Image (cartoon, coloured by chain):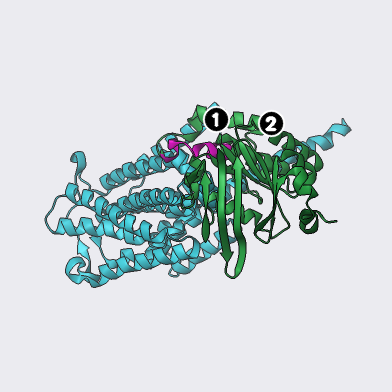
Chain colours: A green, B cyan
Protein backbone atom coordinates (compact mmCIF):
# COMPACT_ATOMS: atom_id res chain seq x y z
CA UNK A 1 0.00 0.00 0.00
CA UNK A 2 1.29 3.46 -0.83
CA UNK A 3 1.59 5.83 2.10
CA UNK A 4 2.01 8.86 -0.10
CA UNK A 5 1.08 9.23 -3.75
CA UNK A 6 1.62 12.40 -5.74
CA UNK A 7 0.11 12.45 -9.21
CA UNK A 8 0.90 14.97 -11.97
CA UNK A 9 1.35 17.74 -9.44
CA UNK A 10 1.87 21.22 -10.88
CA UNK A 11 2.50 24.57 -9.25
CA UNK A 12 3.47 27.93 -10.71
CA UNK A 13 4.35 31.23 -9.08
CA UNK A 14 3.39 33.76 -11.72
CA UNK A 15 5.15 32.68 -14.90
CA UNK A 16 7.59 30.43 -13.09
CA UNK A 17 6.62 26.76 -13.00
CA UNK A 18 8.21 25.34 -9.85
CA UNK A 19 6.53 21.95 -9.83
CA UNK A 20 5.93 20.33 -13.19
CA UNK A 21 3.93 17.11 -13.46
CA UNK A 22 5.61 15.51 -10.47
CA UNK A 23 4.72 11.88 -9.74
CA UNK A 24 5.88 10.20 -6.57
CA UNK A 25 4.82 7.03 -4.78
CA UNK A 26 6.21 6.22 -1.35
CA UNK A 27 5.45 2.85 0.20
CA UNK A 28 4.99 1.86 3.84
CA UNK A 29 8.18 2.13 5.88
CA UNK A 30 10.21 3.50 2.99
CA UNK A 31 12.98 6.07 3.43
CA UNK A 32 12.77 8.37 0.43
CA UNK A 33 15.40 10.99 -0.21
CA UNK A 34 14.53 14.00 -2.37
CA UNK A 35 17.57 15.70 -3.85
CA UNK A 36 18.16 18.43 -6.36
CA UNK A 37 20.04 21.68 -6.83
CA UNK A 38 18.87 24.89 -5.17
CA UNK A 39 15.64 26.09 -6.75
CA UNK A 40 14.68 22.61 -7.95
CA UNK A 41 11.33 22.87 -6.15
CA UNK A 42 11.98 20.44 -3.29
CA UNK A 43 10.53 22.56 -0.48
CA UNK A 44 7.65 23.63 -2.72
CA UNK A 45 6.88 19.95 -3.25
CA UNK A 46 6.85 19.48 0.54
CA UNK A 47 4.56 22.47 0.95
CA UNK A 48 2.19 21.00 -1.65
CA UNK A 49 2.20 17.63 0.10
CA UNK A 50 1.53 19.17 3.52
CA UNK A 51 -1.12 21.53 2.18
CA UNK A 52 0.68 24.78 2.93
CA UNK A 53 0.41 25.48 -0.80
CA UNK A 54 -2.46 24.51 -3.11
CA UNK A 55 -1.51 22.83 -6.37
CA UNK A 56 -2.60 24.24 -9.74
CA UNK A 57 -3.19 20.71 -10.98
CA UNK A 58 -2.67 17.14 -9.88
CA UNK A 59 -3.45 15.31 -6.68
CA UNK A 60 -1.96 14.16 -3.40
CA UNK A 61 -3.08 10.99 -1.63
CA UNK A 62 -2.29 9.80 1.88
CA UNK A 63 -2.98 6.12 2.54
CA UNK A 64 -4.86 6.10 -0.77
CA UNK A 65 -7.19 8.86 0.41
CA UNK A 66 -7.26 11.98 -1.75
CA UNK A 67 -6.14 14.87 0.45
CA UNK A 68 -5.52 17.44 -2.29
CA UNK A 69 -8.18 19.82 -0.97
CA UNK A 70 -7.76 18.93 2.69
CA UNK A 71 -6.46 21.79 4.90
CA UNK A 72 -2.94 21.42 6.22
CA UNK A 73 -4.02 20.96 9.85
CA UNK A 74 -6.30 18.04 8.96
CA UNK A 75 -3.45 16.24 7.19
CA UNK A 76 -1.57 16.37 10.50
CA UNK A 77 -4.51 14.65 12.18
CA UNK A 78 -4.29 11.89 9.53
CA UNK A 79 -0.71 11.09 10.57
CA UNK A 80 1.49 13.47 8.59
CA UNK A 81 4.19 15.48 10.39
CA UNK A 82 6.92 17.72 9.07
CA UNK A 83 10.00 19.67 10.05
CA UNK A 84 11.14 22.89 8.44
CA UNK A 85 14.30 23.82 6.61
CA UNK A 86 14.34 27.13 8.49
CA UNK A 87 13.79 26.23 12.13
CA UNK A 88 10.28 27.27 13.12
CA UNK A 89 9.92 26.98 16.88
CA UNK A 90 8.48 28.94 19.78
CA UNK A 91 11.47 30.93 20.92
CA UNK A 92 9.84 32.46 24.03
CA UNK A 93 9.07 29.06 25.54
CA UNK A 94 10.97 26.12 26.99
CA UNK A 95 11.93 23.04 25.01
CA UNK A 96 9.27 21.02 26.88
CA UNK A 97 6.59 23.60 26.07
CA UNK A 98 7.45 23.38 22.36
CA UNK A 99 6.94 19.62 22.41
CA UNK A 100 3.79 20.01 24.52
CA UNK A 101 2.34 22.28 21.85
CA UNK A 102 3.00 19.52 19.31
CA UNK A 103 1.18 17.00 21.52
CA UNK A 104 -1.66 19.41 22.19
CA UNK A 105 -2.19 19.94 18.46
CA UNK A 106 -3.67 16.45 18.16
CA UNK A 107 -5.58 16.53 21.46
CA UNK A 108 -9.11 17.81 21.99
CA UNK A 109 -7.69 19.42 25.12
CA UNK A 110 -6.40 22.22 22.89
CA UNK A 111 -9.86 23.82 22.94
CA UNK A 112 -10.10 23.79 26.73
CA UNK A 113 -9.95 27.33 28.24
CA UNK A 114 -10.55 26.22 31.84
CA UNK A 115 -7.83 23.79 32.95
CA UNK A 116 -4.21 24.74 33.60
CA UNK A 117 -1.87 23.38 30.93
CA UNK A 118 1.00 22.97 33.39
CA UNK A 119 -1.16 20.60 35.48
CA UNK A 120 -1.64 18.11 32.61
CA UNK A 121 0.76 15.47 33.89
CA UNK A 122 0.12 13.06 30.99
CA UNK A 123 1.17 15.71 28.44
CA UNK A 124 4.30 16.52 30.44
CA UNK A 125 5.19 12.81 30.59
CA UNK A 126 4.66 12.38 26.84
CA UNK A 127 6.77 15.46 26.14
CA UNK A 128 9.56 14.01 28.32
CA UNK A 129 9.36 10.72 26.40
CA UNK A 130 9.62 12.51 23.06
CA UNK A 131 12.57 14.55 24.29
CA UNK A 132 14.24 11.41 25.64
CA UNK A 133 14.12 9.92 22.14
CA UNK A 134 16.20 12.84 20.87
CA UNK A 135 18.41 13.06 23.98
CA UNK A 136 17.11 16.38 25.25
CA UNK A 137 15.14 15.27 28.31
CA UNK A 138 17.92 16.53 30.61
CA UNK A 139 17.41 20.12 29.40
CA UNK A 140 13.63 19.97 28.89
CA UNK A 141 12.90 23.10 30.95
CA UNK A 142 15.61 25.18 29.30
CA UNK A 143 14.27 28.20 27.38
CA UNK A 144 14.59 27.61 23.66
CA UNK A 145 16.45 30.90 23.30
CA UNK A 146 19.30 29.36 25.34
CA UNK A 147 19.77 26.30 23.15
CA UNK A 148 22.22 25.61 20.35
CA UNK A 149 21.27 25.27 16.70
CA UNK A 150 21.80 21.53 16.81
CA UNK A 151 19.54 21.19 19.85
CA UNK A 152 16.83 23.15 18.05
CA UNK A 153 17.06 20.79 15.09
CA UNK A 154 16.49 17.94 17.52
CA UNK A 155 13.54 19.78 19.09
CA UNK A 156 12.04 20.03 15.58
CA UNK A 157 12.37 16.27 15.18
CA UNK A 158 11.07 15.63 18.71
CA UNK A 159 7.96 17.69 17.91
CA UNK A 160 7.35 15.64 14.78
CA UNK A 161 7.93 12.33 16.60
CA UNK A 162 5.73 13.40 19.54
CA UNK A 163 2.74 13.35 17.22
CA UNK A 164 3.27 9.62 16.51
CA UNK A 165 3.09 10.22 12.77
CA UNK A 166 2.84 7.55 10.10
CA UNK A 167 4.64 9.79 7.62
CA UNK A 168 7.37 12.32 8.46
CA UNK A 169 8.58 14.92 5.99
CA UNK A 170 12.03 16.16 6.99
CA UNK A 171 13.20 19.31 5.23
CA UNK A 172 17.00 19.36 5.40
CA UNK A 173 17.37 17.95 8.93
CA UNK A 174 21.18 18.18 8.74
CA UNK A 175 21.35 21.79 7.54
CA UNK A 176 23.66 24.00 9.58
CA UNK A 177 24.84 21.21 11.89
CA UNK A 178 28.40 20.42 12.91
CA UNK A 179 29.90 17.03 12.01
CA UNK A 180 29.16 15.63 15.49
CA UNK A 181 25.62 17.01 15.48
CA UNK A 182 25.03 15.44 12.06
CA UNK A 183 26.01 12.07 13.41
CA UNK A 184 23.66 12.57 16.38
CA UNK A 185 20.74 13.41 14.09
CA UNK A 186 21.67 10.55 11.75
CA UNK A 187 21.55 8.06 14.64
CA UNK A 188 18.25 9.59 15.70
CA UNK A 189 16.74 9.07 12.25
CA UNK A 190 18.07 5.53 12.03
CA UNK A 191 16.33 4.75 15.33
CA UNK A 192 12.90 5.72 13.99
CA UNK A 193 10.96 2.46 13.61
CA UNK A 194 10.03 1.19 10.17
CA UNK A 195 6.31 1.63 10.73
CA UNK A 196 7.01 5.32 10.22
CA UNK A 197 7.63 6.34 6.61
CA UNK A 198 10.19 9.09 6.03
CA UNK A 199 10.49 11.47 3.10
CA UNK A 200 13.56 13.67 3.45
CA UNK A 201 15.07 16.56 1.55
CA UNK A 202 18.81 16.73 2.11
CA UNK A 203 21.89 18.16 0.43
CA UNK A 204 24.48 16.39 2.55
CA UNK A 205 24.88 13.19 0.55
CA UNK A 206 27.52 11.78 2.92
CA UNK A 207 25.03 11.36 5.75
CA UNK A 208 21.79 11.14 3.79
CA UNK A 209 22.63 8.54 1.15
CA UNK A 210 22.84 5.56 3.46
CA UNK A 211 19.55 6.53 5.13
CA UNK A 212 17.65 6.30 1.85
CA UNK A 213 15.97 3.29 0.30
CA UNK A 214 15.05 5.21 -2.82
CA UNK A 215 16.06 8.59 -4.16
CA UNK A 216 14.19 11.11 -6.30
CA UNK A 217 16.13 13.79 -8.16
CA UNK A 218 14.27 17.00 -8.93
CA UNK A 219 15.45 19.58 -11.43
CA UNK A 220 13.50 22.69 -12.44
CA UNK A 221 10.41 21.25 -10.78
CA UNK A 222 10.53 17.92 -12.63
CA UNK A 223 11.48 14.44 -11.52
CA UNK A 224 14.38 13.56 -13.79
CA UNK A 225 15.73 10.46 -12.05
CA UNK A 226 14.20 8.06 -9.56
CA UNK A 227 15.41 4.75 -8.26
CA UNK A 228 17.55 2.98 -5.71
CA UNK A 229 20.67 4.61 -4.32
CA UNK A 230 22.92 2.79 -6.76
CA UNK A 231 20.70 3.54 -9.75
CA UNK A 232 20.44 7.24 -9.02
CA UNK A 233 24.11 7.73 -8.18
CA UNK A 234 25.13 5.87 -11.33
CA UNK A 235 22.77 7.81 -13.56
CA UNK A 236 24.65 10.34 -15.72
CA UNK A 237 21.86 12.90 -15.33
CA UNK A 238 22.44 12.90 -11.55
CA UNK A 239 26.09 13.66 -12.09
CA UNK A 240 25.27 16.30 -14.64
CA UNK A 241 22.76 18.34 -12.61
CA UNK A 242 23.62 17.55 -9.02
CA UNK A 243 26.70 15.57 -8.03
CA UNK A 244 29.01 16.95 -10.68
CA UNK A 245 31.50 15.08 -12.81
CA UNK B 1 5.46 24.40 30.80
CA UNK B 2 6.93 26.22 33.73
CA UNK B 3 6.38 24.77 37.17
CA UNK B 4 6.50 27.35 39.93
CA UNK B 5 7.96 26.09 43.21
CA UNK B 6 5.73 25.69 46.28
CA UNK B 7 7.44 28.69 47.90
CA UNK B 8 6.88 30.75 44.78
CA UNK B 9 3.20 29.79 44.70
CA UNK B 10 2.74 30.80 48.33
CA UNK B 11 4.51 34.11 47.67
CA UNK B 12 2.27 34.82 44.66
CA UNK B 13 -0.86 33.86 46.65
CA UNK B 14 0.17 36.19 49.49
CA UNK B 15 0.78 39.07 47.07
CA UNK B 16 -2.61 38.47 45.42
CA UNK B 17 -4.40 38.35 48.79
CA UNK B 18 -2.64 41.55 49.90
CA UNK B 19 -3.58 43.27 46.62
CA UNK B 20 -7.24 42.21 46.93
CA UNK B 21 -7.37 43.42 50.55
CA UNK B 22 -5.82 46.73 49.51
CA UNK B 23 -8.40 47.11 46.73
CA UNK B 24 -11.24 46.32 49.16
CA UNK B 25 -9.87 48.96 51.55
CA UNK B 26 -9.76 51.69 48.87
CA UNK B 27 -13.24 53.22 49.43
CA UNK B 28 -12.71 53.19 53.19
CA UNK B 29 -9.18 54.55 53.03
CA UNK B 30 -10.06 57.29 50.55
CA UNK B 31 -12.33 59.87 52.11
CA UNK B 32 -13.42 61.82 49.06
CA UNK B 33 -16.13 60.38 46.84
CA UNK B 34 -14.39 61.91 43.81
CA UNK B 35 -11.38 59.64 44.27
CA UNK B 36 -13.58 56.60 44.95
CA UNK B 37 -15.18 57.29 41.57
CA UNK B 38 -11.74 57.57 39.99
CA UNK B 39 -10.89 54.18 41.48
CA UNK B 40 -14.11 52.74 39.98
CA UNK B 41 -13.11 54.20 36.60
CA UNK B 42 -9.68 52.61 36.84
CA UNK B 43 -11.24 49.21 37.51
CA UNK B 44 -13.76 49.39 34.66
CA UNK B 45 -11.11 50.60 32.20
CA UNK B 46 -8.81 47.87 33.48
CA UNK B 47 -11.47 45.31 32.43
CA UNK B 48 -11.59 47.00 29.00
CA UNK B 49 -7.80 46.86 28.75
CA UNK B 50 -7.74 43.20 29.89
CA UNK B 51 -10.18 42.40 27.09
CA UNK B 52 -8.10 44.21 24.50
CA UNK B 53 -4.96 42.56 25.88
CA UNK B 54 -6.31 39.12 24.95
CA UNK B 55 -6.03 40.18 21.32
CA UNK B 56 -3.07 42.56 21.42
CA UNK B 57 -0.91 40.70 23.93
CA UNK B 58 -1.74 37.03 23.50
CA UNK B 59 -2.96 36.84 19.91
CA UNK B 60 -0.68 39.53 18.44
CA UNK B 61 -3.68 41.19 16.80
CA UNK B 62 -3.93 44.95 17.34
CA UNK B 63 -7.54 46.13 17.31
CA UNK B 64 -8.56 49.74 16.85
CA UNK B 65 -12.27 48.98 16.94
CA UNK B 66 -12.83 47.78 20.48
CA UNK B 67 -14.51 50.99 21.57
CA UNK B 68 -17.28 49.98 19.15
CA UNK B 69 -17.91 46.76 21.11
CA UNK B 70 -17.63 48.68 24.39
CA UNK B 71 -20.18 51.20 23.10
CA UNK B 72 -22.61 48.64 21.67
CA UNK B 73 -23.02 47.06 25.12
CA UNK B 74 -23.38 50.47 26.76
CA UNK B 75 -25.94 51.66 24.20
CA UNK B 76 -28.06 48.49 24.49
CA UNK B 77 -28.25 48.91 28.27
CA UNK B 78 -29.08 52.61 27.98
CA UNK B 79 -31.68 52.06 25.24
CA UNK B 80 -33.48 49.23 27.04
CA UNK B 81 -33.50 51.06 30.37
CA UNK B 82 -34.79 54.21 28.67
CA UNK B 83 -37.50 52.04 27.07
CA UNK B 84 -38.65 50.95 30.53
CA UNK B 85 -37.07 47.49 30.72
CA UNK B 86 -35.39 46.10 33.81
CA UNK B 87 -31.67 45.97 34.57
CA UNK B 88 -31.39 42.18 34.29
CA UNK B 89 -32.87 42.13 30.78
CA UNK B 90 -30.78 45.13 29.75
CA UNK B 91 -27.54 43.52 30.93
CA UNK B 92 -28.27 40.11 29.36
CA UNK B 93 -29.35 41.73 26.09
CA UNK B 94 -26.26 43.94 26.11
CA UNK B 95 -23.98 40.93 26.50
CA UNK B 96 -25.83 38.96 23.82
CA UNK B 97 -25.97 41.90 21.41
CA UNK B 98 -22.38 42.89 21.92
CA UNK B 99 -21.16 39.30 21.54
CA UNK B 100 -23.12 38.99 18.29
CA UNK B 101 -21.42 42.12 16.98
CA UNK B 102 -18.09 40.76 18.25
CA UNK B 103 -18.65 37.59 16.20
CA UNK B 104 -19.27 39.75 13.10
CA UNK B 105 -16.17 41.84 13.86
CA UNK B 106 -14.12 38.66 14.25
CA UNK B 107 -15.49 37.00 11.11
CA UNK B 108 -14.64 40.06 9.04
CA UNK B 109 -11.35 41.15 10.57
CA UNK B 110 -9.73 37.73 11.05
CA UNK B 111 -9.50 37.38 7.29
CA UNK B 112 -6.30 39.37 7.73
CA UNK B 113 -3.45 39.96 10.16
CA UNK B 114 -1.02 42.83 10.81
CA UNK B 115 -1.80 46.24 9.32
CA UNK B 116 -4.81 44.91 7.41
CA UNK B 117 -6.35 43.60 10.64
CA UNK B 118 -5.83 47.00 12.30
CA UNK B 119 -7.46 48.78 9.35
CA UNK B 120 -10.48 46.45 9.26
CA UNK B 121 -11.11 46.80 13.01
CA UNK B 122 -10.66 50.57 12.73
CA UNK B 123 -13.23 50.68 9.91
CA UNK B 124 -15.69 48.49 11.83
CA UNK B 125 -15.31 50.64 14.94
CA UNK B 126 -15.93 53.76 12.87
CA UNK B 127 -19.10 52.20 11.41
CA UNK B 128 -20.44 51.64 14.93
CA UNK B 129 -19.46 55.19 15.90
CA UNK B 130 -21.16 56.50 12.73
CA UNK B 131 -24.36 54.62 13.58
CA UNK B 132 -24.34 55.98 17.14
CA UNK B 133 -23.77 59.49 15.83
CA UNK B 134 -26.19 59.50 12.89
CA UNK B 135 -28.97 57.01 13.73
CA UNK B 136 -30.63 59.65 15.84
CA UNK B 137 -34.02 57.93 16.18
CA UNK B 138 -32.32 55.04 17.95
CA UNK B 139 -29.33 56.60 19.72
CA UNK B 140 -30.42 60.21 20.18
CA UNK B 141 -27.32 61.22 18.22
CA UNK B 142 -24.81 63.53 19.83
CA UNK B 143 -27.16 64.13 22.80
CA UNK B 144 -26.76 60.54 23.88
CA UNK B 145 -29.01 58.49 26.16
CA UNK B 146 -29.28 58.97 29.90
CA UNK B 147 -29.76 56.15 32.38
CA UNK B 148 -32.16 57.01 35.20
CA UNK B 149 -30.90 54.61 37.83
CA UNK B 150 -28.29 52.05 38.75
CA UNK B 151 -29.30 48.53 39.77
CA UNK B 152 -29.33 47.27 43.35
CA UNK B 153 -28.06 43.65 43.24
CA UNK B 154 -28.55 41.71 46.52
CA UNK B 155 -29.90 44.86 48.13
CA UNK B 156 -26.67 46.78 47.47
CA UNK B 157 -27.79 50.12 46.02
CA UNK B 158 -25.15 50.98 43.41
CA UNK B 159 -26.27 54.61 43.43
CA UNK B 160 -23.80 55.00 46.29
CA UNK B 161 -20.26 55.56 44.96
CA UNK B 162 -18.69 53.17 47.48
CA UNK B 163 -21.20 50.43 46.69
CA UNK B 164 -20.60 50.94 42.99
CA UNK B 165 -16.88 50.61 43.60
CA UNK B 166 -17.40 47.32 45.46
CA UNK B 167 -19.59 45.94 42.65
CA UNK B 168 -17.03 47.05 40.04
CA UNK B 169 -14.27 45.46 42.10
CA UNK B 170 -16.12 42.12 42.20
CA UNK B 171 -16.55 42.19 38.41
CA UNK B 172 -12.93 43.28 37.98
CA UNK B 173 -11.65 40.38 40.13
CA UNK B 174 -13.78 37.95 38.13
CA UNK B 175 -12.35 39.40 34.90
CA UNK B 176 -8.78 39.07 36.19
CA UNK B 177 -9.44 35.49 37.34
CA UNK B 178 -11.04 34.60 33.98
CA UNK B 179 -8.07 36.12 32.12
CA UNK B 180 -5.57 34.28 34.34
CA UNK B 181 -7.35 30.94 33.83
CA UNK B 182 -7.62 31.52 30.08
CA UNK B 183 -3.96 32.43 29.66
CA UNK B 184 -2.76 29.34 31.58
CA UNK B 185 -5.13 27.02 29.74
CA UNK B 186 -4.35 24.88 26.69
CA UNK B 187 -6.43 27.27 24.57
CA UNK B 188 -4.41 30.20 25.94
CA UNK B 189 -1.15 28.39 25.11
CA UNK B 190 -2.48 27.65 21.63
CA UNK B 191 -3.39 31.32 21.20
CA UNK B 192 0.14 32.41 22.14
CA UNK B 193 1.41 29.82 19.66
CA UNK B 194 -0.66 31.36 16.88
CA UNK B 195 0.84 34.75 17.79
CA UNK B 196 4.43 33.47 17.55
CA UNK B 197 4.30 30.86 14.77
CA UNK B 198 0.90 30.65 13.03
CA UNK B 199 2.27 28.59 10.16
CA UNK B 200 3.82 26.09 12.51
CA UNK B 201 0.65 25.89 14.61
CA UNK B 202 -1.30 25.04 11.47
CA UNK B 203 1.20 22.31 10.64
CA UNK B 204 0.86 20.97 14.20
CA UNK B 205 -2.87 20.45 13.70
CA UNK B 206 -4.34 23.64 15.14
CA UNK B 207 -7.20 25.56 13.55
CA UNK B 208 -5.48 28.96 13.77
CA UNK B 209 -8.50 30.98 12.61
CA UNK B 210 -10.87 29.36 15.07
CA UNK B 211 -8.47 29.81 18.00
CA UNK B 212 -8.24 33.51 17.14
CA UNK B 213 -12.01 33.67 16.78
CA UNK B 214 -12.60 32.33 20.32
CA UNK B 215 -9.97 34.71 21.64
CA UNK B 216 -11.80 37.57 19.92
CA UNK B 217 -15.05 36.43 21.54
CA UNK B 218 -13.46 36.31 24.99
CA UNK B 219 -11.95 39.73 24.37
CA UNK B 220 -15.38 41.00 23.26
CA UNK B 221 -17.00 39.57 26.40
CA UNK B 222 -14.64 41.47 28.72
CA UNK B 223 -15.03 44.62 26.61
CA UNK B 224 -18.83 44.35 26.79
CA UNK B 225 -18.73 43.94 30.57
CA UNK B 226 -16.59 47.10 30.77
CA UNK B 227 -19.08 48.92 28.51
CA UNK B 228 -21.99 47.95 30.78
CA UNK B 229 -20.10 49.19 33.85
CA UNK B 230 -19.23 52.38 31.96
CA UNK B 231 -22.85 53.26 31.18
CA UNK B 232 -23.88 52.59 34.78
CA UNK B 233 -20.93 54.58 36.08
CA UNK B 234 -21.70 57.64 33.94
CA UNK B 235 -25.46 57.04 33.79
CA UNK B 236 -25.10 58.33 30.26
CA UNK B 237 -23.74 57.21 26.90
CA UNK B 238 -22.92 59.27 23.83
CA UNK B 239 -20.99 58.62 20.58
CA UNK B 240 -17.85 60.03 22.18
CA UNK B 241 -17.43 56.77 24.13
CA UNK B 242 -17.22 54.85 20.84
CA UNK B 243 -14.84 57.16 19.02
CA UNK B 244 -11.47 56.17 17.63
CA UNK B 245 -9.78 58.03 20.49
CA UNK B 246 -11.45 55.65 22.97
CA UNK B 247 -10.05 52.63 21.11
CA UNK B 248 -6.65 54.30 20.95
CA UNK B 249 -6.77 55.01 24.68
CA UNK B 250 -7.48 51.33 25.35
CA UNK B 251 -4.51 50.41 23.20
CA UNK B 252 -2.40 52.95 25.07
CA UNK B 253 -3.36 51.29 28.36
CA UNK B 254 -2.35 47.84 27.11
CA UNK B 255 0.91 48.89 25.47
CA UNK B 256 2.05 51.28 28.21
CA UNK B 257 1.36 48.74 30.96
CA UNK B 258 2.76 45.76 29.10
CA UNK B 259 0.93 43.73 26.45
CA UNK B 260 0.80 40.00 27.06
CA UNK B 261 0.92 40.33 30.84
CA UNK B 262 -1.98 40.21 33.29
CA UNK B 263 -0.86 43.12 35.42
CA UNK B 264 0.27 45.38 32.58
CA UNK B 265 -3.17 46.45 31.25
CA UNK B 266 -4.33 47.15 34.82
CA UNK B 267 -1.33 49.40 35.49
CA UNK B 268 -1.81 51.01 32.06
CA UNK B 269 -5.49 51.70 32.81
CA UNK B 270 -4.55 53.27 36.14
CA UNK B 271 -1.94 55.44 34.45
CA UNK B 272 -4.26 56.74 31.72
CA UNK B 273 -7.26 57.31 34.03
CA UNK B 274 -5.14 59.12 36.63
CA UNK B 275 -3.47 61.37 34.06
CA UNK B 276 -6.85 62.09 32.39
CA UNK B 277 -8.79 62.79 35.57
CA UNK B 278 -6.40 63.73 38.35
CA UNK B 279 -3.36 65.25 36.67
CA UNK B 280 -5.61 67.21 34.28
CA UNK B 281 -6.92 69.10 37.32
CA UNK B 282 -3.44 70.50 37.93
CA UNK B 283 -1.82 70.47 34.50
CA UNK B 284 -3.57 72.25 31.66
CA UNK B 285 -1.60 70.45 28.95
CA UNK B 286 -2.32 66.97 30.31
CA UNK B 287 -2.63 65.54 26.79
CA UNK B 288 0.93 66.62 26.14
CA UNK B 289 1.96 65.03 29.42
CA UNK B 290 0.24 61.74 28.59
CA UNK B 291 1.97 61.74 25.21
CA UNK B 292 5.33 62.47 26.82
CA UNK B 293 4.84 59.64 29.34
CA UNK B 294 3.94 57.25 26.54
CA UNK B 295 7.01 58.28 24.50
CA UNK B 296 9.20 57.81 27.59
CA UNK B 297 7.74 54.33 28.14
CA UNK B 298 8.31 53.36 24.51
CA UNK B 299 11.89 54.64 24.62
CA UNK B 300 12.98 53.32 28.02
CA UNK B 301 10.64 50.37 28.57
CA UNK B 302 9.42 49.31 25.12
CA UNK B 303 7.96 46.12 26.58
CA UNK B 304 5.72 48.22 28.88
CA UNK B 305 5.81 49.40 32.48
CA UNK B 306 5.27 46.06 34.22
CA UNK B 307 7.73 43.89 32.24
CA UNK B 308 10.11 46.88 32.13
CA UNK B 309 10.00 47.30 35.89
CA UNK B 310 10.57 43.55 36.35
CA UNK B 311 13.56 43.72 33.98
CA UNK B 312 14.95 46.74 35.81
CA UNK B 313 14.48 45.09 39.22
CA UNK B 314 16.21 41.93 37.98
CA UNK B 315 19.17 43.81 36.57
CA UNK B 316 19.49 45.84 39.78
CA UNK B 317 19.31 42.65 41.82
CA UNK B 318 21.92 41.01 39.63
CA UNK B 319 24.11 44.10 39.82
CA UNK B 320 23.89 44.13 43.60
CA UNK B 321 24.53 40.35 43.70
CA UNK B 322 27.52 40.53 41.35
CA UNK B 323 28.70 43.59 43.23
CA UNK B 324 28.78 41.56 46.42
CA UNK B 325 30.50 38.61 44.75
CA UNK B 326 32.94 40.98 43.09
CA UNK B 327 33.79 42.59 46.40
CA UNK B 328 34.16 39.20 48.08
CA UNK B 329 36.33 38.07 45.20
CA UNK B 330 38.48 41.13 45.75
CA UNK B 331 38.44 40.60 49.52
CA UNK B 332 39.31 36.90 49.16
CA UNK B 333 42.99 37.11 48.17
CA UNK B 334 43.68 39.81 50.77
CA UNK B 335 42.75 37.44 53.55
Furthest-bottom residue in view? B134
Quadrant where the N terminus of chain B sits is top right
Residue in view at x 45 percent, y 56 percent: B253
Against A147, residue B294 (above or below) is: below
Q: Between marks 1 and 2, how big is the CA–CA gap? A: 23 Å
Mark count: 2
The quarter of the picture where residue A195 lies is top right
- Estimate the x, y position of residue B257 in percent, counting from the top left: 49, 53
Of A181 and A136, nearer the camera is: A181
Question: For the residues tagged 1 and 2, is the chain the same?
Answer: yes
- Estimate the x, y position of residue A163 in percent, counting from the top left: 55, 36
Q: Chain of mark 2?
A: A
The quarter of the picture where residue B110 lies is bottom left
Q: Report whether residue B40 is seen.
A: no
Of A27 and A211, nearer the camera is: A27
Residue in view at x 59 percent, y 36 percent: A28
Q: Which residue is mark 1?
A: A124
- Estimate the x, y position of residue B136 in percent, counting from the top left: 20, 71
Residue in view at x 73 percent, y 39 percent: A211
Q: Chain of mark 1?
A: A
Q: Which residues are magenta?
A: A98-111
Indicate yes or no whether the magenta region holds residue A101: yes
Residue in view at x 30 percent, y 43 percent: B166
Q: Which residue is mark 2?
A: A191
Specify the principal SS of the magenta part: helix
Amino acid sequence: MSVLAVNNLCKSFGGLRVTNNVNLTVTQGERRLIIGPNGAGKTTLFNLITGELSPDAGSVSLFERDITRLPSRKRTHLGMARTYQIITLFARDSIAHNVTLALLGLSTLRWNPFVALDRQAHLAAQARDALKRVGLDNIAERPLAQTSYGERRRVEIAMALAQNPKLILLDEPFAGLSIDERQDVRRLLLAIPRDVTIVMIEHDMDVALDLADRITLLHFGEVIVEGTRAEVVADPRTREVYLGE
Amino acid sequence: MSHRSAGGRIAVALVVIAAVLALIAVPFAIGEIYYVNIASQILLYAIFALGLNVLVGYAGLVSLGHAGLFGIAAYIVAYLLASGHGHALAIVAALAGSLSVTACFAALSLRATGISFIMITLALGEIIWGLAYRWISLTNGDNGISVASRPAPFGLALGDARHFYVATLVVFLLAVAASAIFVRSPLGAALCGTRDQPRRMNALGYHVWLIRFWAFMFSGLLTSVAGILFVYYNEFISPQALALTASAEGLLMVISGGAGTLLGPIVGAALVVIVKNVVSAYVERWNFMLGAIFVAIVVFMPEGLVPGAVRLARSLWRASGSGKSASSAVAGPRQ
